[in-house]
Amino acid sequence: MTKVSSADEFKAQGDGKMEEKKMNGCDVTKGKWVYDESYPLYTNGSCPFIDEGFNCGTNGRQDRDYMKWKWQPQDCDFPRFNAAKMLDLISGKRLVFVGDSINRNQWESMLCMLMSAVKDPKKVYETHGRRIAKERGNYSFKFVDYKCTIEYYVSHFLVHESKARIRQKRRPTLRIDAIDHGSSKWKGADILVFNTAHWWSHFKTKAGLVPLSNCGSSSLVMINYYQEGNQVHPKLDVSTAFRKALMTWAGWVDRHINPRKTRVFFRNLAPSHFRGGLWNSGGHCMEATWPLNDTSGMEYPEKNRIVEEVILQMKTPVTLLNVTGLSAYRIDGHPSIYGKKPGTRYSSNIQDCSHWCLPGVPDTWNEILFFHLQSKEKSKYHSKIRL
């Protein structure tokens, strides 16, 4: 089949000053989606680790084309994911994913992709006997024959979710100057894959979110939510808080991560595809069974620019997994109403157009991670400021 669209058409509106650094002469962010009958790399039946929210096929989704798309960079041959080679790369190591539920999406994808090379499934187990569930956040799966672990630690913001007394009541706050209290578990990892973005603009916090329209700005501010030290900001716009939180994370990485031992990645924003409303106001994507042909109307996310600027200020080399542009085409890849089993679904007015079906788009993110891990080059940045 022919391509759907090229990510090279979907450019950032930045100043273009960032130096281009390619992996072995290949910019993996430029390319096209190609229909490939040999995909997916695993099935819902072959992988026991897909939780209900991502298990679209088992939950009743009938179309299968969304599993069949391969990302093809335009400047190089992109190697097909090789589970045996990946397990050899991480043999004796800890591969750790830290972030929100979109990173859990990617972590589950990685578990499934690796299982195809495992001869005895009984030699892969969760070290605390936990079953994967949406309500739980910390997991470590051991691959016995390879003496490695694939781990996930939930951290919606990478910084500490706290409480403070405001007008005689204790209310939730976000300590944008303090790293998440679970950070001790991240130390000692050989490969770290971070993300945060989903909760910063998802109306998921319990505090009030209001537009700064009266100030002549289209920004959003949080009321009595962001905290630094003992000070709870009466009003602070989300972008400023996001930058402060990323600087807190960057400081932690620079202080606690030894780049001679640990390879650090940061995956940027994976776009949602709500049509006709937001996630809680009738937004939908259920009708989409094919990737978009054009994404030129989508702006490059401000949060991506902030991430890039923070990474460039760090001492520790951090590789950006720039998945925004290639994922932007994949409106067909979300669970929509198929994030729950038949009979337990929400009404069709509540659809999941943020997470991703498995098998699906996160498999491509892991193919890109695999591609980077095969390279000995450790650069702060491997692609232009582009989607």
Image: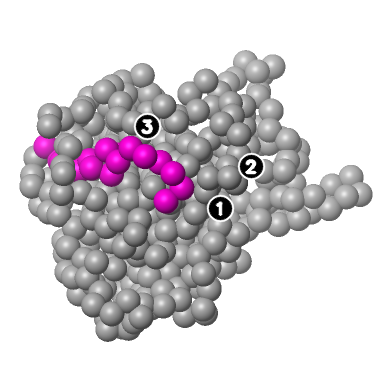
Q: Which mark is residue 156?
A: 1
Image vertical order of residue 213 relative to residue 378, above or below = above
Give residue 207's quadrant in the image.
Answer: top right
Q: Is residue 155 left or right of residue 152?
A: right
Image vertical order of residue 373 relative to residue 66, above or below = below
- Dot 2 crowding, Cα within 10 Å, few <14, some 14–19, many 20+: few
Q: Position of residue 215 (x, y in %)?
A: 66, 18
- Which structural element holds mark 2? loop
Q: Are marks 1 and 2 in contact (CB under 8 Å)?
A: yes
- Dot 3 crowding, Cα within 10 Å, few <14, some 14–19, many 20+: many
Q: Is residue 331 left or right of residue 178?
A: left
Amino acid at the residue labelled 2 = Lys
Quadrant of the drawing holding the C terminus? top left
Q: Which mark is residue 331?
A: 3
- Which structural element holds mark 3? helix
Amino acid at the residue labelled 3 = Ile
Residue at image location 39% in from the left, 65% down from the top: 48
- Residue nearest the viewer, comparing 85 with 182: 85
Q: Position of residue 25 (x, y in %)?
A: 9, 47
Residue at image location 66% in from the left, 56% down from the top: 161
Viewer can see residue 294: yes
